[in-house]
Image: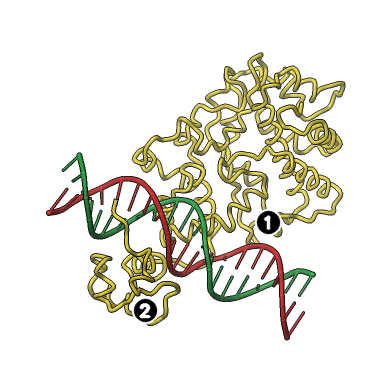
Chain colours: A yellow, B red, C green
Amino acid sequence: MGRSPCGHDDENGLKKGPWTPEEDQKLIDYISSHGHGSWRTLPKLAGLNRCGKSCRLRWTNYLRPDIKRGKFSEDEERKIINLHSAIGNKWSRIAIKLPGRTDNEIKNYWNTRLRKKLLSMGIDPTTHKPRTDLNHLVNLSQLLGAANFGNLISPWGSALNLQADASHLAKIQLLQNMLQLMNTSPLLNMESTHDLFIGNRNLNPFEGFLNGTNTLLNNKEPFQSGLENLNPGLTNPEAPSNFQDFDNSWAGLEDGFNPEILGLKNSSLSSTTSSYENEIEIMNPVPESFSDSPHGTYNINQMESKIDPNQLISTDSASTYTIFEAWDKLMDDETNDSYWKDILELTTSSSPSPAILW
DNA sequence: AATCACGTCAACCGCAGAGGG
DNA sequence: CCCCTCTGCGGTTGACGTGAT
């Protein structure tokens, strides 16, 4: 492997650091009339006391005429998040799908903003799955409480303008965390979770899911929430194994979520053996309005509107419950707030380890 | 006004792969 | 094959700006 001598510019007397307008102009003038050709020889020909590597970087990341500067749009944010969930830190690959944006710019934007935004929403930016750490559950507990008492100070700033949205979001995040824990803990089984959620209570949001009256989960197989598959990202073994396959199906990922590419074609929100296995086609984990722009209010309804409810209806004629009917029941029942607090107390006080939460 | 903390982003660094001799 | 050059990529750094104290 050859090593560019650019790392030793000081020894070679070559300039490093920020570019001056004069240097920029020299580079622009030369490339405009000659093209860049060999980057190695370009600096000398253009009269620049820089290494070729530095020239290339300056051109591709800053001086190129087709570079789009300025704030990322909501659409661009969505694309970045969806693409990152599928291919990870492949910034140059992502940049190809965002005309006018450089890999460096996208990388910076991810590290400084999107990453934090996902974290604040309870999503692990690496796996794109809900976070499961206890601290986060406690934070959600506080958020939920604040929202319910009409005293919300949103950590998302203007991204959450409505208390109702914040409350819904907190519940969703909490539910995802719990389901994730249920699914990953070896100590959990259907009976214990049933006991936890059902207990002696007659009314609870999981009743339809867990007590067998709802065919969505009416089976004896080990519980699998399926929510962890909302965005399997890099961990999905069905994800395309090479970029050719990946590129062949870009269209869906650019505008939203492509379940087939991510191996979600046969994913399920219920059990591994239920008849609903092939019913779930599209679940977009990235809300339509994700930006923290003034118009970027997080709206649960928008998230649901991305999904065709017909695709979620059971093929079992005995069932009239759709996932989202159950979901609405869960989310809309304000009498459940105390129930959520009970769950939070259980989940955050009974054990120091998520593995033995239940 | 001075200092500190933090966020942003241009630029650098080191590595890896492609390709030519 | 091996060696070397060139190019591109992803991670990291550090200068700078801004807001808080």
Q: Position of residue A187 (x, y in %)?
A: 70, 21
Visible in this render: residue A8?
yes
Q: Element at badge 1?
A: helix
Mark 1 vs 2, N-terminal side: 2
Residue shown at 54% from the left, 28% from the top:
A267
The amino acid marked with disc number 2 is: Glu
> Mark 1 — on which chain does it sit?
A
Of A292 and A190, nearer the camera is A190
Residue, disc 2: A23
Residue shown at 38% from the left, 65% from the top:
A57
Q: Element at badge 2?
A: helix
Residue shown at 51% from the left, 67% from the top:
A70
Q: Position of residue A230 (x, y in %)?
A: 58, 36
Of A110 and A187, nearer the camera is A187
The amino acid marked with disc number 1 is: Ala
Q: Are tags 1 and 2 found on a single chain?
A: yes
The residue furthest front is A11
Of A318 and A13, nearer the camera is A13
> Mark 2 — on which chain does it sit?
A
Q: Position of residue A72 (x, y in %)?
A: 53, 61
Say few, some or many: other residues with alpha carbon within 10 Å of mark 2 (under 14 / 14 to 19 / 20 or more). Answer: some
Residue, disc 1: A159
Using residue A209 as the reference point, say whether residue A203 is left or right of it. Answer: right
